Image: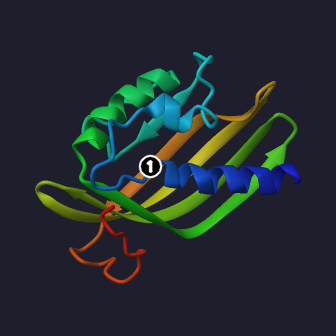
Amino acid sequence: MNDERLIADLHGRWVFGWERNEGDGPFDFRRTFGEFYDFDSTDLRLYDDFDPEQRVAATATGYGSIWEPHFDRMVSAHHAVDDGPHVIVSHHLAASTLAFVARITTSDGATDIRTTTSLVWRRTPDGWRIVREHNSTRVLPAGDLDGRLPVYEAG
């Protein structure tokens, strides 16, 4: 598999790492995303404007600490790729952009979102790893994703 296809596959699988089903155990960022982020690097910049505090993390562990409490409180989170991924690769760096839609369900109800995500990947001895992340999210009108996401059965 060439690097462009590999990065496209990684980015697509990364989206679905954020899935949550009702009854899931605690969200463990490192266990879920260990193959995606460079957990040994201290020069990362990871940002998602869906974080209410809009923090920028400089480590993968720090980024995980932003999201674990939020995902532990979710009832479910279901995603679908809306566009992409679009990938460029050059030597030891690659960039990918992808848009996804998701329905986030909490005890307060459901929120539909559309997120554009841009990732920069660095080739490491362990494979391609995320070293930059920027996500921009727009909340959609209630019910906007009805019929656009797979139906999930409680199991």
- Quadrant of the image occupied by residue 35: top right
Looking at the rendered structure, the kind of residue marked 1 is: Trp
Q: Position of residue 23 (x, y in %)?
A: 28, 50
- Left or right: 120, with 151 as reference point: right
- Left or right: 77, with 62 as reference point: left
Residue at the image position 27 percent from the left and 39 percent from the top: 72
Residue at the image position 54 percent from the left and 40 percent from the top: 133
Instruction: For mark 1, give the secondary structure.
Output: loop
Q: Position of residue 4 (x, y in %)?
A: 81, 54
- Left or right: 96, with 59 as reference point: right
Residue at the image position 65 percent from the left and 61 percent from the top: 85
- The local crowd at label 1, few if under 14, some if 14 to 19, many if 20 or more residues have their Cα within 10 Å, is some
Tell me if residue 149 comes above or below residue 105 in the rendering. Answer: below
Q: Position of residue 127 (x, y in %)?
A: 77, 33
Residue at the image position 37 percent from the left and 75 percent from the top: 151
Q: For mark 1, what is the residue? A: 18
Q: Quadrant of the C terminus?
A: bottom left
